[in-house]
Amino acid sequence: MPRQTPPVTLQTNVAQPSRSTFAGLFLVTLAAVTYEVLLTRIFSVIMWYHFAFVAISVAMFGMSFGAVLVYVLPRIFTVERTKDQLTYSALGFGYGILLYCVLKLGFTDDARVLAAPSLLSTYVFTAVPFVFNGVCVCLALTRYPRQTSRLYFADLVGAACGCLAMIGLLRFFTGPAALLVIACIASLAGLLFSRSASTAARARSVIAVVVITGATVASLAAHGTRFAFAELRRAQASWIYEKWNPFSRIMITPDPSSTAPFGWGLSHTFRLVRPAQKSYSLVIDSVAATPITNYAGDDSNLQFLRSDIINTANHLRQNARVLVIGAGGGRDVLSALVFHQQSVEAVEINGDSLDALNGRYGDFSGHLDRDPRVKFVNDEARSYIARQHSRYDIIQASLVDTFAASAAGAFVLTENSLYTVEAWKTFLDKLNPHGILTFSRWYPDGTPWEYRLTALATQALAESGMANPRAHIVILRVMGVRQGNRGVGTMLVSKDPFTAADIAGVETLAREMQFEVVLTPNFALDDTFARIATSRNVPLLASTFAVDISPPTDDRPFFFDMLRWRDFLQPVSKPDSVYIQANSDVVATLLKLAIFVLVLTIASIVVPLAFTVQRSALRASVPFFFYFGGIGVGFMMVEISQMQRLIVFLGHPTYALSVVLFSLLTFSGLGSLSTGGTQTRRRSHLTLLLLLACLAVFGGVTPMIIARFAGAATPLRIFLAVLILAPIGFLMGTAFPLGIAAAADRAASITPWLWGINGAASVLASVLAVIVAMAAGITASFWIGVSAYLVAVIAFFAAQGQGVTSTPDLRVASAGR
């Protein structure tokens, strides 16, 4: 993560750091950032990937608290013990990760992990290794002030490499096994630090390396690729294949119901005439599953697919060019073959899913990739579709989100790039005149999600120039036999108005298959669908509903978040309370987490520092409090808002997290280093004013760049993301060292306190940024961050106006919170 390091203290070592010290710092920061990024994958299994911000908050808190310990416990962290303590803190970091792997009882596959006690215990337990890391980095960067630039370079390179290391680790190890590898790296850092430490420290470091490495090797030897926490192993004892990667964890299990045909929305009229094909279940992360069906080129055993509601568009459009969003286990590809469509392109972001389907289990699945009518594409669907010059007759997305996640409220915080007005306008643009966009989703009784989906379709059609959106929309539903009240709904959106023949075909199919007609140009199951589909101002109409059914946009891409924040504390009258209970639970958890983080931060960072500084010095430094609090809030609001924005742009949270962290690490570090040397008041003022100007330009230009290049290839989009983050990263990196230098010139004793305020503000802002984005949009979150920087700059000018004329050359290492 972007590094925030403490100011230089008056206590320094006489001896210079050895080469092993630089190497140790490189490894310990590499391990820390790899651990942080890997936590986003671990949390994907524990509590869904949208809690990635928790990993950032945990890392910030742990490192801040660790560095504060160095300042408030001077009798323990003495100069004479520095080399030994570098060794012990690095080893403690490794042991902390090891204990997290052994003792943590997480990895449950249901919503209980979102309960406050479980979430808070996860927060604290996961932060422990970061505390040791904070101690280690603080000692390394403050005890050798004459070598700060070189040490910081090692810190910066290690952290930047850590952003990329996780991607490599998950190519060879499972998530839990990768954690143990990171523990080994941390222990090796301790071994390197110990080369210039005492004999006892060297001996203990050797023992630690042996213990941690031995535990890793033993675990891998015993479990291989199946290595996981005990509870996860018990829950998934039937695995026959498992693979982790930066996108997900996939597992293959035999389908116990493979003797009967599987269809998400099979008609009640379907009767099995001959045994269905066997299938495997491809499970993604926790419970999202898709079948891999046995196929040998004969589709006579697959005719049940004609009775599945998700294939309604295939009934209406024959000899069609089909594009499938999310190839998964190949079910929609088989459907296109059963209907004898002209061709089918299946886009899948997860390359390992395609490898499982067409490689490892290719003989079982019939090597669909070898069929001349079929083309598989490993890419992010939205950008792939946007850059295609050809047109399609059907664009199909079938249950790309799962009922288990939806029912648990697990996707409430998810930035979903497929469910926005901008995305649907792109899909419609790539259809032939009579082409159909079809989305199939779980449709339980009494849920308002299809109202929101209708609002999304209506708004996208209106913005695409369609005068009568209702004439372009059809919705059908079937109640599942095995799913109880968990029905499956299919929405069809046609680029041209549905013809009379199309509507007659839908009605005939619905009668034969006993599908329920929800909405057509001529019929509405209830008046709400008709009002939404015919509204000329969908956002205004949506504002009159008890829940938020407004069309999601790229700025507010939270499709499943249907609870208005202003109504959170007010009871919602039935039946709407049933609709939004899951939303309410998740939002309540988020608010509880914010309160917990606030209390924990004050108790562990602010209060201890309050006893280390004289009150007179604090009173004289009030402008600096606003300055460091402002840049702490500003940095995190900008950072997390860009992660959320780039999730939509790049198509996956792992890309966004890695790109944002790598870019801000690299360029804010360079910005920090550029402040070395004497800084005049004029130069400091110009630098901070340039920061504000750059942020303002960035806020205006970035949405246009993202819109312009939404259809670019993934490597180009990543390059553009790095390019647009570079200027603000560089300038944000100057803010922290400029403030520390100015404060040290006035009263050096307050610098630990200022650093603590900055760290506390960053921790709190990591949660606040998510709340603001959900309530008001990603853009609002960004501009609040800019406003925080504005407050900080005004405070800096006020402090400078009290008589400081220049700032000394402290060469402080920081990445600019």
Image (cartoon, rainbow, N blue to C red):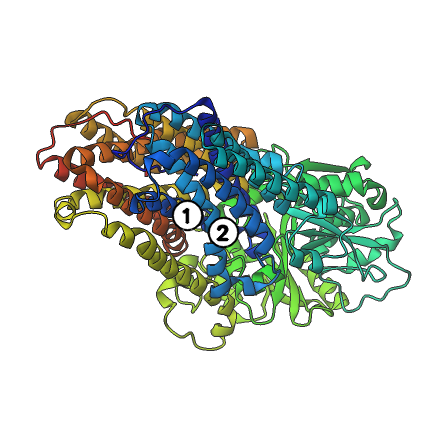
* Relative side of 266 to 617, left or right: right
Q: Residue 281: x percent and y percent?
A: 75, 54
Question: How far is the residue under mark 2 from the one under mark 1?
Answer: 9 Å
* Relative side of 467 to 608, left or right: right
Type of amino acid under label 2: Thr
Q: Nearer the viewer, residue 485 or 201?
A: 201
**Mark closer to the chain start, 2 or 1:** 1
Q: Nearer the viewer, residue 253 or 15?
A: 15
**Looking at the rendering, in which quadrant would you find the N terminus?**
top left
- Residue 126, numbered circle: 2
Q: Nearer the viewer, residue 118 or 333?
A: 118
Q: Residue 329: x percent and y percent?
A: 74, 48
| Number of numbered labels in the structure image | 2
- In terms of image quadrants, where is residue 402? bottom right
Q: Residue furthest front?
A: 199
* Relative side of 359 to 20, left or right: right
Q: Dot 1, crowdedness within 10 Å: few (<14), some or many (≥20)?
A: many
- In terms of image quadrants, where is residue 401? bottom right
Q: Residue 166: x percent and y percent?
A: 57, 37
Q: Nearer the viewer, residue 75 or 536?
A: 75
Q: Which residue is mark 1?
A: 62
Mark 2 and mark 1 residues within 8 Å of each other at the beta carbon: yes
Query: At 57% across and 33% down in the image, what residue appears?
Result: 387
Type of amino acid under label 1: Gly
Vertical order, 277 against 592 (above or below): above
Query: Does the image show residue 260?
Result: yes
Q: Residue furthest bottom?
A: 574
Query: At 57% across and 45% down in the image, what residue appears?
Result: 428
**Looking at the rendering, in which quadrant would you find the C terminus?**
top left
Query: At 45% across and 55% down in the image, what residue appears?
Result: 124
